[in-house]
Image: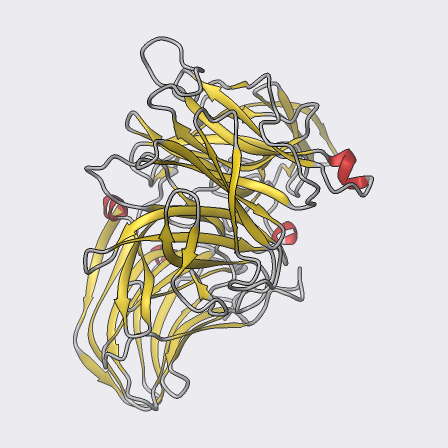
């Protein structure tokens, strides 16, 4: 194996005692202490449970994606990061870039906490017209907008410990300077006042910020990214309020019939349909100041029914000729994120996904698909012959060490009484089940026997999602990556994302018809290459 080590990764062994290696990692002026046994040490990105084609941090704690912006052929991904532990702590913005949304280069930490507080979630834009006057030379500056979180104020029981700040870069995001006039939006006395997402609104030539404020969002306008005016509020009596509102996004999309609509995404810390963290969305109209929901205010639309897609937002400044709205989420859940059984790092991001608006049998809905760039890392494929599995029959379609990272594409028909299962298993007889239940007309992921689960009583369970389509043929596209599964059902009308932690990687896949007959119309199993190492 050849392991890809980036230039910021410099290790020095500083002590060997009682069989333990204490490894210091000097990174952008921050010392990290890692502890590994000399017998169990594994090369970088070959640790147990490490995803092989999803983004994950080199080391330590990661949560929400931040500052996602495209500039000069690079997709920038910043993210919530604590460089000194694998549990949440003083938040920084760490940084990575990609030219293809699949392969990532880790860069030094971009933003550090300061006297105004930790650096919480936010966004970034290209200030093409230099409205902020932060630019130097002929190139536009990148401007980051983020929440300051003053931990002393939180501990004192204050309500005004979160404010909004900005920073700018004139070297393609490699270094950042915080604005001397921070905070640009003070706190009005709201405890949860955070996660600014900024967009440019062309009709008015103004910047628009959508910001969560406990149980609703606030919308602001600005001419220069420094001076902001509150123009409206949305959500007090709309959608789900099972948890605090977080990580909003706002963007236009063309429907499949050519109508422009606006989508607002809002994550919730709790209250998702299968428990814990989740993301809802609204479809409506926006005039530069006010968002109007076109659906009944009590209706809740969920972006993902799995347990592990949270705090996701979309990239800004994607070129018009590309035309996609590209989304990325944090692949974890606050119910157990800090105790999952990974040692030197915690959590990963979902695959980048395109969002589209489609008129479905349930109404206008977001349709989610993996980005087309995933094709660049697909390996060899095996086609499945059309056939029928009678009740109780099963078909083994894969037994290989490469099954732990693969794409399974199926088109099936089960009938109303059918229950169809895809079982992924290992030598310990641990198994993950993905399937469709015709009696309930729902998709599901069952991770009750998938591997380690004793780290949290919130982890094990069966997670379900109602089917939208009435087509007799069910389409499933399943991405399996060592410790995660993403299920795109019916061409992306329904989505489920779950993580799991088997004692050894899954090596076998079986198709099972549990109730009724299941017709396999077509299918294909494809291996997926690692983005971090070469075999």
Residue located at (51% from left, 31% from top): 145
Question: Is the residue 422 above or below the residue 452 in the image?
Answer: below
Picture quarter with the C terminus = top left
Q: How is the image coloured?
A: secondary structure
User: Between 30 and 221, which is closer to the camera in this rendering?
Assistant: 221
Res. 111 visible in picture? yes
The x and y percentages for residue 500 are 52, 60
The reply, left or right, for residue 23 in relation to residue 240 is right
User: Between 211 and 429, which is closer to the camera in this rendering?
Assistant: 211
**In the figure, residue 479 lies in which quadrant?**
bottom left
User: Between 105 and 252, which is closer to the camera in this rendering?
Assistant: 252
The reply, left or right, for residue 283 in relation to residue 459 is left
Q: Which residue is the extreme one toward the right? A: 156
User: Between 325 and 460, which is closer to the camera in this rendering?
Assistant: 325
**In the figure, residue 138 lies in which quadrant?**
top left
The x and y percentages for residue 46 are 47, 42
The x and y percentages for residue 191 are 70, 45
Residue located at (29% from left, 58% from top): 357
Residue located at (41% from left, 85% from top): 440
Picture quarter with the N terminus = top left
The x and y percentages for residue 324 are 27, 45
Residue located at (31% from left, 46% from top): 325
Res. 4 visible in picture? no
């Amino acid at each position: 194996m050849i392991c890809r080590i980036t230039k910021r990764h410099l290790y020095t062994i500083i002590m060997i005692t009682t069989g333990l290696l204490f490894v210091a990692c000097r990174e952008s002026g921050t010392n990290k202490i890692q502890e590994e046994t000399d017998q169990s040490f594994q090369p970088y990105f070959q640790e147990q449970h490490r995803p092989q084609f999803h983004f994950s941090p080199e080391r330590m704690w990661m949560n929400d994606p931040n500052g996602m912006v495209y500039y000069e052929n690079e997709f920038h991904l910043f993210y919530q990061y604590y460089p000194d532990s694998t549990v949440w702590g003083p938040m920084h913005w760490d940084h990575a870039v990609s030219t293809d949304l699949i392969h990532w280069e880790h860069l030094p930490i971009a933003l550090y906490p300061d006297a105004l507080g930790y650096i919480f979630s936010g966004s970034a834009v290209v200030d093409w017209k230099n409205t902020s006057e932060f630019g130097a030379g002929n190139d536009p500056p990148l401007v980051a907008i983020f929440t300051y979180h003053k931990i002393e104020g939180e501990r004192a029981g204050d309500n005004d410990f979160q404010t909004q700040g900005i920073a700018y870069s004139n070297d393609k995001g490699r270094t950042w300077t915080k604005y001397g006039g921070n905070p640009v939006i003070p706190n009005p006395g709201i405890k949860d006042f955070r996660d600014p997402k900024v967009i440019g609104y062309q009709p008015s030539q103004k910047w628009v910020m959508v910001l969560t404020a406990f149980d609703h969002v606030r919308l602001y306008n600005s001419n220069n990214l420094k001076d902001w005016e509150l123009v409206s509020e949305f959500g007090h009596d709309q959608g789900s309020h099972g948890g605090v509102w977080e990580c909003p996004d706002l963007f236009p999309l063309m429907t499949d019939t050519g109508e422009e609509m606006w989508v607002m995404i809002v994550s919730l810390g709790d209250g998702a349909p299968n428990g814990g963290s989740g993301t809802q969305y609204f479809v409506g109209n926006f005039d530069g100041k006010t968002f109007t929901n076109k659906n009944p205010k009590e209706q809740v639309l969920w972006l993902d029914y799995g347990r592990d897609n949270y705090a996701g937002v979309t990239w800004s400044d994607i070129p018009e000729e590309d035309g996609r709205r590209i989304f990325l989420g944090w692949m974890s859940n606050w119910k157990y994120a800090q105790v999952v059984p990974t040692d030197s790092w915690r959590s990963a991001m979902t695959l980048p996904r395109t969002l589209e608006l489609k008129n479905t049998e349930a109404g206008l809905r977001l349709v989610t698909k993996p980005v087309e760039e995933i094709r660049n890392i697909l390996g060899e494929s095996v086609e499945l012959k059309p056939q029928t599995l009678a009740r109780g029959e099963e078909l083994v379609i894969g037994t290989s060490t490469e099954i732990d990272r693969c794409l399974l594409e199926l088109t099936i028909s089960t009938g109303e009484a059918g229950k169809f299962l895809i079982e992924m298993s290992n030598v310990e007889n641990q198994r993950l089940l993905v399937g469709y239940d015709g009696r309930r007309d729902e998709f599901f992921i069952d991770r009750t026997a998938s591997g380690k689960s004793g780290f949290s009583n919130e982890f094990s369970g069966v997670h379900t999602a109602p089917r939208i389509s009435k087509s007799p043929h069910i389409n499933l596209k399943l991405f399996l990556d060592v410790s995660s599964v993403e299920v795109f059902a019916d061409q992306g009308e329904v989505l489920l994302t779950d993580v799991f932690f088997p004692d050894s990687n899954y090596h076998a896949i079986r198709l099972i018809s549990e109730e009724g007959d299941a017709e396999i119309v077509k299918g294909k199993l494809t291996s997926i290459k690692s983005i971090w190492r070469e075999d």
